[in-house]
Image (cartoon, grey):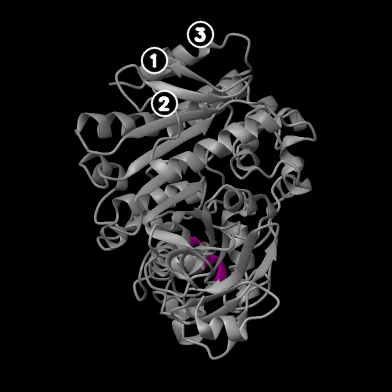
Amino acid sequence: MSEYVAEHVQDGPGARTRHGVLRGALKDGVASFLGIPYAQAPVGALRFRAPEPVEAWEGIREATAFGPTAPKRPYAPPLDALLPDPEVAGDDCLNLNVWAPWPAAGLGEDGPGKDGPGDGGTADGGRPVMVWIHGGSLVHGSSAVPVYDGTAFARDGVVLVSINYRLGIEGFGVFPDAPTNLGLRDQIAALTWVRENIAAFGGDPERVTVFGESAGAISIAALLASPLAKGLFRRAVIQSGAPIARSIDVARMTTEAIAARLKVPATAEAFAGVDPEQLLAAQTAVTGKGNPVLNRHTFHIAVDGDVLPDHPGDLLADGASADVELLMGTNTDEYRLWFVPGGHTEKVGSLAQRFLLRKGRISPRVAKVYREGRPQEKPGEVLGVIAADKLLRIPLNMLADARLNSGGSAATYLYEFGWGSPVLGLRACHALELGFVFDTLDLPETRALTGPDAPQDLATAMHAAWVAFAETGDPGWRPWGPARPVMTFGPGLPSVVEAPREAERRAWEV
């Protein structure tokens, strides 16, 4: 490492970024650097503004504790018991974390390519990098969630980065006097930081994979389509998300509903004058009963002509990011996280199912295929499967087909996670795969959703596939093609299934 870092960083691993020197923590060959700012705190004059570059610091900055999380409220019961969502107080919420094998590869003390902590610049033969973007419906979540611990990735040779970004009205409000998609702009700023600094941790800035789940996956689909993110990553993983965005007018509706509750104009200037706790309370009152299936008031990524020139699905179908290798998939029973804890599978009868299907503009032909194929399932369960397929599985299949038909240079891979949790009968619900991907099944926060006996061999296999994809662009099975191969992770051993539930998928074809 450089003379400055070697001389002044003691009792911990050190890395020199472009903004200053960091001291992290070291355990079992993995260095962790937590709470690193990638942009200035979005407060005061910078609130409701695009992220500004972080200011340099003098001396050594301690990086051994998670940084502040974006303003948010916990999940409402009963989800709060299933989805841990820690809160860290403070204004500097635009921060990230790095886990890296240590000593790091890159610019070491004996020269380029040797072992030793980096000193900025470009690594020679650095390690693959993965950047995690958390989910939470754009109003929950943070990089401090224990399930997202990056130790296993670093153990297996990957430099793992997890980021925070602005949530809710602060990140996805739509105002006439402020930039749109601030949360996405935060993510782009974080990826820019990674490109400029990750060599200091032994990472290769030319081998960056972004991956995320739920709202994080939706964000990644938008980043794949955004000209502002072009060149910031080489590969992408979309877990239980899809290319989803709304027009400015539709995306503005949630902002206007919150403004009406607060009795203030729907402007950034007016919102900036509202007490933060009062603002969070109004936001929760408006969005708290929403979920991806029932689709009440919620926040959306907006097609703004800047970050997103058009709908991301259309841009990707037209060839955007055709050179980016893509891994994507869903869980078999996504809907059960949203339906089962609240009792919707029991409350929805045949009449309510038909009403909600009409409201969701599901054709009777599609509904008939699902009903006939699932004669033993309750109306609420059939409704949930249809809604989740419309929201997630069908759009991802369409995207895979579009990428294949466009003749792009990069491969596409699909997976399905099917192991069922015994907790509350959630089965293979939304978010269940996270502890398997991060190989964190032993954590109590993971077991809240998986139960105590989740199969470690399945986590080992799934985690290894994500590592292989980051390293080589190949997770270990055939890329998407006419046979429609899907790697299924459980129940049982991982195996490739061709065209799963094809009759239901084909029912959506016009």
Looking at the picture, does residue 37 appear above or below residue 479?
A: below
Label 1: which residue?
A: 365
Question: Quick one: SS at disc 2?
Answer: loop
Q: Which residue is mark 3?
A: 372
- Label 2, residues with CA under 10 Å away: few <14, some 14-19, many ≥20: some
Identify the magenta region.
256-262
Q: Between 497 and 334, which is closer to the camera in this rendering?
A: 497
Q: Nearer the viewer, residue 165 or 299?
A: 165
Of circles 1 and 3, which is in front? 3
The percent coordinates of residue 131 (x first, y second) are 48, 55
Coordinates of residue 141 in the picture (x, y in percent): 61, 57
Earlier sequence position, callout 2 versus callout 3: 2
Q: Residue at x 60, y 37 (%)?
A: 433
For the point 37% across and 29% down, the residue is 397
The residue indicated by pointer 2 is 362
Between the C-alphas of marks 2 and 3, the distance is: 16 Å
Q: Is residue 344 in the magenta section?
A: no
Q: Tell me the element at label 1.
A: helix
Amino acid carrying mark 2 in the image: Ile
Q: Main secondary structure of the magenta part?
A: helix
Q: Report the number of discs.
A: 3
